Amino acid sequence: MESKIAQITENIIGILYNDGKGKTAELAALRSTKVITDRYARKVIPLLASYSYGDLVLDNGEINPKILAIYNALKLYAIHQQGQTNNDGNLRLVYASEKTSGQNLIALLGQLRKDEEVRNGLDRQVNRLLAAPNLDFMMNILIRLIKILKSKNKIDSIDYGRLAADLYIFQKGIDAASGVRFRWGALYYQNFNKNTNEEGVN
């Protein structure tokens, strides 16, 4: 299930990237919407409906958790992609694709933690992320963290498919959410310690 969510997310991002030209209207809509039910989200609903699987809305009227996970990963990608261009004016690849591998977002933040100028603020945001009670709260923090990466010119390609899968797992219940929190915390702090120890050896 999670691998399929990751693949769908990567496929839709490839369409949004549009060989470097970008789907301007859809990317702008993703950046400007707070939640999937916002009126601007109508520009991306066709993409979700065409390339996802299953119903967008469940029988009980709630948004399908798979769709929420994919949509929120797309939103983070759109924020990350904004302003990232090559010298020829085309969009720079900032997501995992056939042309470039992507890094885990949380591991990348762990690398950024080496920067003492942002470490305290970064730790505060990540600790809030690890205590997130729901997806909306988590997304608010993830958006801030993406913006921190951009402010430090960290334009590494991110594995948004993996992120979408994690956002789906987070919604599956208390134990599943705790597992995501634990794994992210380990990635963040262990990645920093690993890099620091390697620098010490050199």
Image: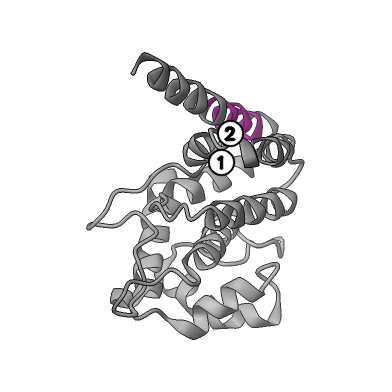
Q: Is residue 185 magenta?
A: yes
**Residue that label 2 marks:** 180
Dot label at residue 120: none
Q: Is residue 191 magenta?
A: no
- Residue 176 coordinates in the image, percent (x, y): 61, 33
**Residue that label 1 marks:** 169
* Magenta stretch secondary structure, dominant: helix
The magenta segment is 176-186
Discs 1, 2 touching: Cβ within 8 Å: yes
- Residue 4 coordinates in the image, percent (x, y): 38, 51
Q: Secondary structure at mark 1?
A: helix
Left-right relation of 33 to 150? right
For image coordinates 67% across by 73% down, the residue present is: 33
Amino acid found under the numbered disc labelled 2: Val
Q: Secondary structure at mark 2?
A: helix
For image coordinates 43% across by 68% down, the residue present is: 84
Amino acid found under the numbered disc labelled 1: Ile
Image quadrant occupied by the N terminus:
top left
The answer to which quarter of the image holds residue 131 is top right
- Residue 107 coordinates in the image, percent (x, y): 48, 36
For image coordinates 65% across by 82% down, the residue present is: 40
